[in-house]
């Protein structure tokens, strides 16, 4: 209902402006404009009534209705005063318009003073009469709100506890390079050249002095992994087969492997085959999560 009244108010308000403009044009052309102006005034009254009715439906506060009333009365009084000033040379029209403006000003003052007095003296009486069943509805709504708050609080506490457990596990894993293993996924934190349960020392060109190269290889379980760069610099993930071969120049190197570059905070997918290991370079810090 309030939407319908709002539409009526909008149409009546637009009609008021349009009819008033038409009456001004007719007046300049020395044509009969009084009937159009009366229609404009009627449209204005309809807009006032529909606006006040819509406000009454949306708010049960009497002071709100009074405020709406004196606002429209004030606008009407100002508009009629302006019209009366333009009709000074026509005494009959000027007197009639002036009387209407006086009535509008009277309504404005009465509603304005009443709304101020109502709110100032006893704000609790400004609200309208209670509707039957309204208190019960408010109580039910309050109870539902309390239940929802309790459930939301419990869910949040559970989520926080789970998050804390995960954070503790990750912190411990980061400190020791250990493994987090749960129902979801196997997660391994690898810090370059720091040993853990999967690491093994490997050597290339053993016994060749300065050309000898020692490293740690991480023989994590075979499978498909998501590797995430948790370090501060871009790097690369090296996966080699634990099998050496000698080049024509007589240097040892790994017989097979795969290398992929990875940016900071980036995640890539790579497969670690059986008998292969992960090789990192300082200061790499990698999280490996098994996904298959």
Image (spheres, rainbow, N blue to C red):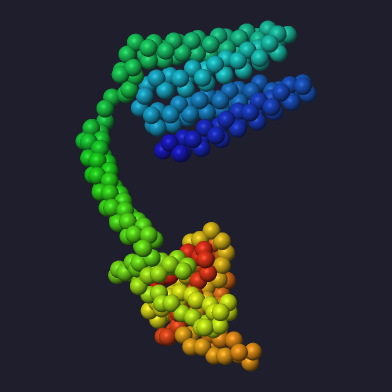
In the foreground, 237 or 15: 237
Coordinates of residue 84 in the picture (x, y in percent): 65, 12
Residue 93 in view in this figure: no
Image quadrant occupied by the C terminus: bottom left
With 136 as the anchor, is 42 left or right in this view?
A: right
Q: Is residue 93 above or below residue 276?
A: above
Total labels: the figure holds 0
Residue under the image location 34 percent in, 68 percent down:
179
In the foreground, 126 or 183: 183
Image quadrant occupied by the N terminus: top left
| Residue farthest to the bottom, as pictured | 248
Coordinates of residue 92 in the picture (x, y in percent): 65, 9
In the foreground, 169 or 121: 169
Residue under the image location 78 percent in, 23 percent down:
29
Q: Is residue 232 above or below residue 34?
A: below
With 185 as the anchor, is 6 left or right in this view?
A: right
Residue under the image location 53 percent in, 69 percent down:
281
Residue 241 in view in this figure: yes
């Amino acid at each position: 209902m309030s939407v319908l009244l709002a539409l009526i108010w909008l149409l009546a308000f637009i009609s008021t402006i349009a009819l008033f403009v038409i009456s001004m044009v007719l007046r300049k052309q020395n044509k009969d404009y009084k009937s159009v102006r009366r229609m404009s005034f009627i449209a204005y009254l309809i807009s006032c009534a529909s606006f006040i009715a819509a406000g009454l439906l949306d708010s049960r506060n009497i002071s709100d209705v009074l405020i709406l009333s004196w606002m429209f009365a004030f606008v009407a009084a100002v508009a009629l005063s302006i019209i009366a000033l333009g009709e000074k040379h026509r005494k009959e029209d000027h007197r009639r318009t002036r009387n209407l403006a006086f009535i509008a000003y009277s309504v404005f003052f009465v509603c304005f003073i009443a709304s101020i007095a109502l709110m100032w003296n006893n704000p609790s009486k400004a609200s309208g009469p209670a509707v039957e069943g309204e208190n019960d509805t408010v109580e039910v709504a309050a109870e539902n709100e309390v239940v929802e708050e309790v459930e939301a609080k419990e869910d949040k506490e559970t989520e926080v506890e789970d998050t804390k457990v995960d954070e503790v596990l990750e912190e411990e894993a980061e400190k020791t390079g250990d493994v987090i293993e749960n129902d979801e996924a196997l997660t391994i934190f690898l810090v370059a050249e720091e040993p853990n349960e999967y690491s093994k020392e490997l050597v290339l060109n053993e016994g060749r002095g300065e050309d000898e190269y020692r490293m740690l290889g991480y023989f994590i379980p075979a499978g498909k992994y998501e590797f995430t760069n948790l370090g501060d610099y871009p790097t690369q993930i090296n996966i080699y087969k634990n099998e050496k071969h000698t080049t024509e120049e007589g240097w040892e190197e790994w017989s097979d492997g795969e290398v992929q570059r990875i940016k900071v905070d980036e995640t890539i997918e790579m497969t670690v085959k059986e008998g292969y290991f992960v090789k990192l370079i300082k200061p790499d810090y990698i999280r490996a999560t098994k996904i298959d």
